[in-house]
Every structure is written in C-alpha cells, then in structure tokens.
Amino acid sequence: MSRSLLILNGKKSDYPGFRETVESLRSSGLEILVRVTWEYGDCQRFVDEANELGIERVVACGGDGTLNEVANGLMNLPREKRPYLGIVPLGTANDFAVSCCLPQDVSEALKNSVEQAPRTIDMASAEDHYVISVASLGFGATVTYE
C-alpha cells in the first residue's frame, strides 16, 4: 500500500474540499499523513520525518513557495531515499503547476498526487539551493500578485 505525507501550508489549512478529499482517500485504503506548516523550516522537518517513516510520496500542498521548500527538502536527501513529490496547487499563481498542466481542482490534484505514476523532472541548482521552476528576485511574484 502506498503511503503519502501531505505538507500543507498553514495558511491554507481550511481550504475548501481539502479535508473531505483526504478523508475520502483514506476510506479507500490509502495511508495518508498530514502535516501543517507554521514557520520556515517546517517543510524540511516534515520531509525528514517522511524519510524516517519510509513514506513513498511527499505532497506539497500550497503555492510555489511551499513547493520550493518541499522540493529543496527532498533534494537534501540521498537520491535512493528520496520520496516522490506530488503537488496540490493552493497558492495565488501556482506557476509550476499551471506550466505542467496539473489539475487546479483540489480534489483532482490530491487524487493525482497520491495515485498517479510519478514522472521525472529536471531541477536547476545554485550552490546548495535547488530551483524547480523559476529563479527570480521577487519581481515576478509582485507582478503576478498585482
């Protein structure tokens, strides 16, 4: 049985349909753990926990910032111990998810993240930081927000 750990951005903890979808997936037999972030560094701690528990999939549930933190946490693990990354786009822009044509509906995205076969993607790196989509200095997010 596949085991997944969802890392949910704390600002999105009451996102409509999220809890119901998790409960539905659990009732279908999937083992799903949920962790909610509170501050910077939580994503790395939760990724480390997933590694210790032998979790197969870690799902970033939030926006591009959450995705970036989770992806960097995963890249800090040895390749052979790295869980698959799933994405549930709950942010404002969701640039990476939109670019990859991932479902924007929370239920569909969550189901895909824990049930679908993983695909390989490339990531760029600068020193010890990894970039999954775009490297910028904040201007892009400001433009998107406004």
Image (cartoon, rainbow, N blue to C red):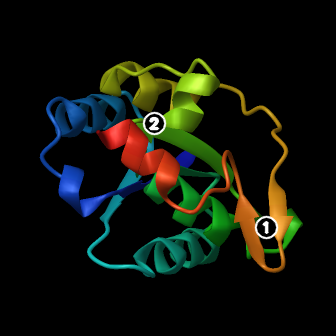
Judge from the rendering whether residue 58 lies leftward or rightward of residue 127; answer left or right: left
Q: Position of residue 90 (x, y in %)?
A: 33, 39
Q: Identify whether 30 is placed above or below 49.
A: above
Q: Secondary structure at mark 1?
A: helix
Whether pointer 1 and pointer 2 mark residues with C-beta atoms closer than 8 Å, the reply is no
Can the viewer see residue 63? Answer: no
Q: Quadrant of residue 18?
A: top left
Q: Position of residue 137 (x, y in %)?
A: 57, 63
Quadrant containing the N terminus in the rendered view? top right
Can the viewer see residue 58? Answer: yes
Q: Amino acid at mark 1?
A: Lys
Taking depth in this image into account, of 9 and 20 the one nearest to the observer is: 9
Mark sitting on residue 29: none
Marks 1 and 2, the one that precedes in the sequence: 1
Judge from the rendering whether residue 47 lies leftward or rightward of residue 129; answer left or right: left
Q: Secondary structure at mark 2?
A: loop
Taking depth in this image into account, of 146 and 8 the one nearest to the observer is: 146
Q: Residue at x 71, y 27 (%)?
A: 117
Which-is-in-front pick, marks 1 and 2? 2
Q: State the CA–CA distance, disc 1 to disc 2.
A: 27 Å
Q: Residues within 10 Å of mark 2 (few under 14, many from 20)?
A: some
Quadrant containing the C terminus in the rendered view? top left
Residue under pointer 1: 81
Q: Residue at x 52, y 35 (%)?
A: 95
Q: Residue at x 22, y 50 (%)?
A: 12
Q: Amino acid at mark 2?
A: Asn
Q: Position of residue 138 (x, y in %)?
A: 49, 59
Residue under pointer 2: 94
Q: Position of residue 97 (x, y in %)?
A: 54, 31
Judge from the rendering whether residue 99 lies leftward or rightward of residue 11; answer left or right: right
Q: Residue at x 18, y 52 (%)?
A: 13
